[in-house]
Each structure stands twice: as C-alpha cells, then as structure tokens.
Image (cartoon, grey):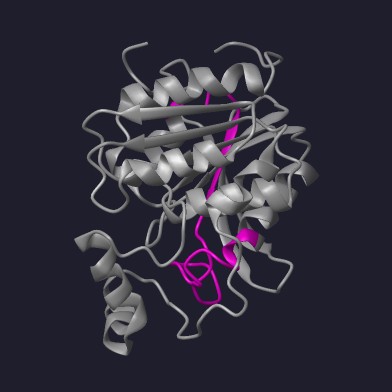
Amino acid sequence: MSDAIDHSIAGPQEERFWLTTSDGVGIDAVLLRRAEPRTTAVVLANGFTGTYRSPHTRAIAEGLMSVGDVMTFDFRGHHGSGGQSTVGNAEIHDLEAVVSRLRELGYSRIATVGFSMGAAVAVRHGAIYGGVSAVVSISGPSRWYYQGTRSMRLLHLGIGRSMGRAFLRRFRKVRVTDRRWDPTPAEPREIAGEISPTPLLVIHGDADSYFPVSHATAVYDAARHPKDLWIVPGMGHAERAVAPELVVRVREWLKPRLSATEPEG
C-alpha cells in the first residue's frame, strides 16, 4: 500500500451529469466508475475555487476507486456549474443534489469527503440532510469569518470587494455573490454533533496556512461518536496537500464503513 492509485483499475469509465439543486442551480458533475455495477460510492467536495478538473482531485478520486465509484463536481459559481458561489452556505444543496443522483443510480452506501469549504459543506450536509454512510472533513474550518491567518485575510479581501470578485471571475473561473449571508448558517462546530450516528473522520495538517489545528479539534470535540481525528505532520491545506499515503489511509478507513460487499480489484 505504498501508492494511492489502485493499479488494478485500468482507466475508470467517465459519465458526465448536469444536476439541478433544490433551489434551481445547475451543477456540473462527473462520475468515475468501474464497468461492473457497484452499490458504494464516494463524493468529493472541493474547496473554494477547486474543480473536478484539477489533477489533485483526479488523483484522490482514482485513489479511492477500490472503495466505490467516485463522483466529483463543481460547486455553484465554479467553472461549468451555474449560479454564484456563496462560499459554503447554499452549497449544501449542491452536495445533496449529487448524493440524491447517486441514490437514483442505485448506490445504497455513500460517503462524502470534503476539503476546506467542501469540508464545512460535508459536515453541515451530514448533520442536516444525513442519509450518508460516512463523512470525511479535510482541512475544514470550525467557524465562519475566521481571519486569523494571512491566507484567510487575503481570501476575505478577495470575496468581499468587487475587484477581488472580478479577479476570481476572470482568473479562477469562480463567480462569487456580493450578498451577505442572511441568516448566517450554523457553524460546523455548532452542528457537528448532529452527524452521529454516521461516522465522522476529521483530518487536518499541522502546517495548514489557512486554518490552524484548533479548527479540527473544535469540530472533533463537538462531534459525538463514532468519530476519529487525524492531525497530519507537515501537511498543508486541502486537495493540493493530500499525499498518496493519506489517500491510502482514508481508503482503508472508508472500506469497513461502506461495507465489504464490493469485489476486490
């Protein structure tokens, strides 16, 4: 298990979907699947400005293919999806649209794996919508409006000013709303306890330049069992920081929680 990519899977099949959320936003999604039908699936929820087109997201997806088929997607306001990004609030509907489509396709056990903003969305989705078999939060915030690091201060400048939003739209293909949250949703640390009895795995790097480790421990402490916390030495932030070895660990954590009903590669 020295490599995250399962080389027994040669070229997963790709199927593209255009989904519609409960509030009418179109979501661009791609399902990576094996040729034979399977009943387990993993959803990857990217961080802010992330996309399923990223080689980092693709590598993680391929590394999890032995657990189940993997659906990746772009949040609202990102790349090919419709609407505008609300930076973690209305995105809960995007994730539910993906999970619902997987259920329609016959997947009975589904895990959600979120990164940064996507981690906050996955925690909130697991607490509010439920119905998934496992939730994994990687590099996620515990509370809103955090500006305790230089990276987060720059991010708030980017989304809070018209020039910053124009830059994101032109150079990152991300369209951010200029409306403030009203009402403000419950913070991940406030709602994590509602995920139980679904298993929760919280992962955070001790070299994260956006959110310090205290964010991970706050979410973990607020959650109820079953739960696990991994603090990864030297790991930075979100998808780009996920090493092949960590994908292997996540894969092994997910397998028993998605049941050992799938044939081995």
Closest to the observer, 130 or 109: 130
Q: Residue at x 52, y 37 (%)?
A: 221
Based on the picture, tell me whether residue 27 belongs to the magenta stretch: no
Residue 211 percent across, percent down from the top left:
32, 51
Q: Is residue 161 above or below residue 36?
A: below
Q: Is residue 170 left or right of residue 19?
A: left
Residue 220 percent across, percent down from the top left:
51, 37
Based on the picture, tell me whether residue 90 belongs to the magenta stretch: yes
Q: Residue at x 60, y 66 (%)?
A: 185
Q: What stretch is highlighted in magenta?
A: 63-92
Q: Is residue 86 above or below residue 244?
A: below
Residue 90 percent across, percent down from the top left:
60, 68
Residue 244 percent across, percent down from the top left:
32, 26
Q: Is residue 203 left or right of residue 157?
A: right
Q: Is residue 248 left or right of residue 209?
A: right
Residue placed farthest to the bottom in the image?
162
Look at the image and tell me whether residue 32 can be seen. no
Q: Which residue is drawn at 27% across and 87% down?
A: 163
Q: Is residue 147 above or below residue 107?
A: below
Q: In which quarter of the image is the C terminus?
A: top right
- Among the 4 quarters of the image, the one containing residue 71: top right
Q: Quadrant of the N terminus?
A: top left
Q: Main secondary structure of the magenta part?
A: loop
Q: In this view, does 54 lie above or below 222?
A: below
- Among the 4 quarters of the image, the one containing residue 213: top left
Q: Residue at x 43, y 38 (%)?
A: 217
- Among the 4 quarters of the image, the one containing residue 28: bottom right
